[in-house]
């Protein structure tokens, strides 16, 4: 059917007049923001449907294979039994930053009853235009971005190859870019008679690297030659490409401004959130320039605020030790090692909170826990592509548990970097449901994991690594702000003034919190905002340049540092009386798994050893993870010793023996 009037429906089910002209930003009747959800229609059939057609009395064909859902408040059609073509999209949901998601199906009944798979989160902008291919954007990209794009493709090779879809990375028109981020239009299955390898990927890259920027061209050509002419292992290529990426990124300057705050909200009796930094943070603390954390406590006034504060303070102590280790090294730590270390730190935090629960005999919903989203900017030293020594490789590591979120915001886009740990996401990841259908479950937003509910071995952790190579804002927030998609709907009003120098970071944090209290006033809200600037030609008046020497080896006086951190743990500033009692407890036994907590449906990761420290990694994991255990040992010495006795003799050797 050819459309004669372009309309879009309001998503508010209580709206009295939901029909609006397409292109309006808010509903004329109820002032609800209108959702323009552009979809990618897969398959040869969809390519034959001309623009201007309305499919299934719902989907407006804007351009070839680009459809607009004019009724975004309704669930899309999904067969009772999911077709096999949709399963890989569900299994790869954790890669949603780079891959589209299965949205639903549509039938063009007038011509063909074949169902057309529709994809959301496709590389299509807010006006319905598809993002450029890598080929189209290559010549305008910086040297760091060119290498960064190739590095992202290499990280996708294994997960796609494992499911038989590595061919998706060899179709040039399928590889799109939204700024720094590589995004795929759809998945292309590798034919059974094809055996794709790194040689095929290298041949695909050959055309691009011939026109790479001068500072990285030789390095890229050498890597591609190895991929094409030898049977080199993926790990070896990964190491070389990572080293070239860090050397290219280190050419750029990096200055930042960070601010954070937490607010009780208009309806809550107490604040169970915690964040770092906040208004009480020491502005001269070196850690301030690298670490940001948001935690949302669970468990009411009897424990939620304790769990979130414990998480923040324990993470700070462990990260301080990690950064001290990094600054003392003369060789680059690979991202896998730092990712494992951050995972180990979160497991320590989890067991610390879990031990408190078990000591208090808390069961079921009485157990205190916390979500966490944390970002760590790691300042490694490296020789740049042009030969000078830089003090920062521009690496940013991001970890999250629960539904606290991280967003990357520039003048042109707002990207959600994290995936929530909730029931809706679990149903998708287990290939039981499409996401939009899962959202209609009554328990869709219930958390499937948080720090402290059960033993750390049950945690599913993913630590992501990003490269800071463009001006942008990293926004960490609790669900007090992110609920009902208010970040996605309002980011331009609250972030662009910071990027253009018209607003300070501190004022932006206050404005985000005020928005949350106005729109989502049912909860506490925490916001930490970091503005990273790498462009040398644009100086923002409100942004203070920080010293190039990011962190000094002032942690040499270890005992003094550790005592200061423990003092912070023992002297919280705003706890209720019952919460203070919890913090003063000295635990006496190892936290067992609680029989009252129902087991999660998430498959437990295959871990042959108890913590990352046991995995054979060398100085870093043994050294700084033991500093993480130091926090546990100080707060719960007897329980910690019991845990240590269950580990191997090698690991027991690093456990403190007394207090």
Image (tube, grey):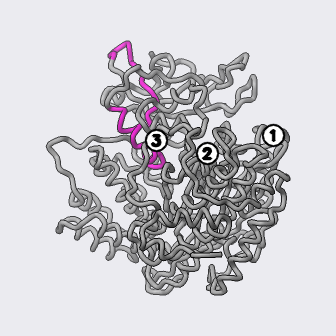
Indicate whether residue 327 is drawn in magenta: no
The answer to whether one can see residue 369 in this image is yes
SS at circle 3: loop
Position of 147 relative to 75 (above/below): below
Q: Earlier in the sequence, mark 2 or mark 1?
A: 2
Residue at the image position 42 percent from the left and 43 percent from the top = 603
Q: Is label 2 in a helix, a strand or a loop?
A: loop
Q: Quadrant of the N terminus?
A: top left
Quickly name the residue at label 2.
403
Identify the residue at the far top of this view. 110
Q: Is residue 125 left or right of residue 337?
A: right
Please identify the quarter of the rendering in which residue 44 is found: top left
> Which residue is under mark 1?
518
The image shows residue 417 at horizontal and vertical percentages of: 55, 51
Where is residue 27? Give x, y as percent. 71, 27
Residue 640: percent from left, percent from top: 58, 65
Front disc: 1 or 3: 3
Helix or strand or loop: what does disc 1 sit on?
Answer: helix
Magenta stretch: give its range: 85-113
Residue behind mark 3:
602
The quadrant holding residue 150 is: bottom left
């Amino acid at each position: 059917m050819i459309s004669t009037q372009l309309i879009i429906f309001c998503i508010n089910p209580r709206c009295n007049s939901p029909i609006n002209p397409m292109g309006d930003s808010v509903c004329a009747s109820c002032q609800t923001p209108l959702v323009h959800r552009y979809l990618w229609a897969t398959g040869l059939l969809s390519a034959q449907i001309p623009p201007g057609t309305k499919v299934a009395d719902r989907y407006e064909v804007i351009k070839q294979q680009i459809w607009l859902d004019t009724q975004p408040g309704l669930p899309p059609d999904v067969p009772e039994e999911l077709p096999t073509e949709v399963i890989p999209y569900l299994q790869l949901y954790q890669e949603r930053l780079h891959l589209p998601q299965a949205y639903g199906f549509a039938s063009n009944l007038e011509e063909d009853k074949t169902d057309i798979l529709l994809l959301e989160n496709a590389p299509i902008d807010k006006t319905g235009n598809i993002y450029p291919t890598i080929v189209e954007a290559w010549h305008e990209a910086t040297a760091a971005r060119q290498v960064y794009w190739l590095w992202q493709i290499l990280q996708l090779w294994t997960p796609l190859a494992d499911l038989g879809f590595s061919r998706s990375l060899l179709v040039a028109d399928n590889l799109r870019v939204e700024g720094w981020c590589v995004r795929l239009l759809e998945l292309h299955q590798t034919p059974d008679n094809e055996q794709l390898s790194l040689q095929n990927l290298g041949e695909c890259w050959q055309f691009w690297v011939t026109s790479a920027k001068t500072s990285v061209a030789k390095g890229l050509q050498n890597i591609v030659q190895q991929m094409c002419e030898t049977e080199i292992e993926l790990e070896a290529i990964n190491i070389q490409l990572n080293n070239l990426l860090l050397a290219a990124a280190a050419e750029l300057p990096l200055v930042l401004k960070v601010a954070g705050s937490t607010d009780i909200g208009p309806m809550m009796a107490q604040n169970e959130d915690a964040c770092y930094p906040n208004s009480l943070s020491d502005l001269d603390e070196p850690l301030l320039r690298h670490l940001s954390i948001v935690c949302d406590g669970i468990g009411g006034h009897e424990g939620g605020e304790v769990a979130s504060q414990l998480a923040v303070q324990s993470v700070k102590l462990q990260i301080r030790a990690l950064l001290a280790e990094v600054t003392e090294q003369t060789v680059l730590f690979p991202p896998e090692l730092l990712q494992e270390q951050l995972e180990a730190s979160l497991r320590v935090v989890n067991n610390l909170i879990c031990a408190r629960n078990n000591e208090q005999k808390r069961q079921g919903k009485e157990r205190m826990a916390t979500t966490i989203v944390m970002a760590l900017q790691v300042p490694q030293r490296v020789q740049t592509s042009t030969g000078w020594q830089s003090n920062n490789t521009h690496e940013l590591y991001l970890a999250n548990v629960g539904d606290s979120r991280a967003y990357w915001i520039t003048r042109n886009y707002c990207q959600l970097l994290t995936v929530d740990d909730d029931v809706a996401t679990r149903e998708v990841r287990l290939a039981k449901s499409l996401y939009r259908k899962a959202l209609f479950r009554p328990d869709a937003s219930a958390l499937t994991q948080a720090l402290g509910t059960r033993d750390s071995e049950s945690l599913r952790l993913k630590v992501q690594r990003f490269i800071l190579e463009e001006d942008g804002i990293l926004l960490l927030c609790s669900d007090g702000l992110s609920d009902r998609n208010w970040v996605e709907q309002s980011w331009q009003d609250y972030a662009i003034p910071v990027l253009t120098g018209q607003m300070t970071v501190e004022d932006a944090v206050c404005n985000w919190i005020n928005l949350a209290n106005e729109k989502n006033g049912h909860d506490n809200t925490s916001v930490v905002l970091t503005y990273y600037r790498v462009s040398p030609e644009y100086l923002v008046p409100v942004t203070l340049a920080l010293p190039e020497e990011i962190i000094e080896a002032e942690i040499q006086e270890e005992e003094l540092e550790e005592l200061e951190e423990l003092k912070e743990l023992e002297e919280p500033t705003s706890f209720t009386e019952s919460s203070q009692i919890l913090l003063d407890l000295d635990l006496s036994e190892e936290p067992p798994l609680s029989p009252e907590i129902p087991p999660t449906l998430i498959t437990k990761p295959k871990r042959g050893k108890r913590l990352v420290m046991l995995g054979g990694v060398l100085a870093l994991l043994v050294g700084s993870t033991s500093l993480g255990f130091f926090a546990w040992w100080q707060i719960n010495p007897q329980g910690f010793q019991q845990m240590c006795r269950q580990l191997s003799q090698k690991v027991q050797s690093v456990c403190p023996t007394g207090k």
